Amino acid sequence: MQTFTDIINNFTSINIVKNIQEIISKPTSILTIIGLILIILVIIKVKKIKLNTKIICEIGIMLALATVLKLCRIYHFPQGGSVTIGSMVPILLMSLLYGPEIGFLTGGLFGIITLIMDPYILHPAQVLFDYPLPFLSLGIAGYFKKNKLLGCGVAIFSRYICHVISGVIFFGSYAPKGTSPLIYSLTVNTSVVGPDGLICLLIISLLPIEKLYTLLNNRNHETNITK
């Protein structure tokens, strides 16, 4: 378990300028991510979901919280990946409270933040399956508002599948001799996403999601009456 000093060191050790330069050197990856975000925005537009100032501010707050929680590592694996103190929870919350589309947008943006914090680029498809897609898929929880734990479990599993696919296709060469890329990817990602997901499910189970949802609906109703 990391101390507060370790968390500060994690933050200060991030070389944003160098990371951005590395990302810019791979323009096809940037275009792929931009295209994905544009698709999400089009879906939001088609669904007639209003991105008002309140929702945009809440997305920003949740992204900041998720970023801080991602720096709070319980354990960092040598081969990459960390078990954190619930870094997926803010994205899952946005999905449960505002629906899957807002969850997809929040998760996709967090994937970009993760890419900026720790870029590892081999191929545009690998970037998609390691950064925006896994966190974007957490928005699936929004389809299960009546069963928050099932929804979050499905969403976390979908993130796991994205990482496994990336591992098989792009990191299979790292598998020990005699071990298939699939088994290697399953083992590595289970050891990372598994504990991280269980921590998030525990936190979600303790949060009064139903009360928050009721409070949010009441506030929206009062706002509409005022208008």
Image (cartoon, helix red, strand yellow):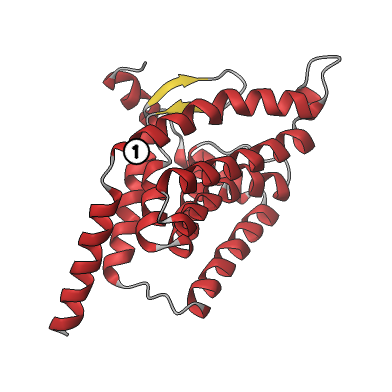
Farthest left residue in view = 226
- Location of residue 8 by image quarter: top left
* Above or below, 195 relative to 161: above
Residue named by callout 1: 205
Q: Nearer the viewer, residue 98 or 104?
A: 98
Q: Is residue 220 left or right of residue 94?
A: left
Q: Nearer the viewer, residue 94 or 129?
A: 94
Q: Residue at x 26, y 46 (%)?
A: 208
* Above or below, 198 relative to 151: above
Q: Position of residue 68 (x, y in %)?
A: 34, 37
Q: Position of residue 3 (x, y in %)?
A: 30, 17
- Location of residue 56 by image quarter: bottom left
Q: Residue at x 58, y 40 (%)?
A: 157
Q: Disc 1 residue type?
A: Ser
Q: Residue at x 43, y 43 (%)?
A: 149
Q: Residue at x 52, y 39 (%)?
A: 18
Q: Is residue 107 left or right of residue 190?
A: left
Q: Secondary structure at mark 1?
A: helix
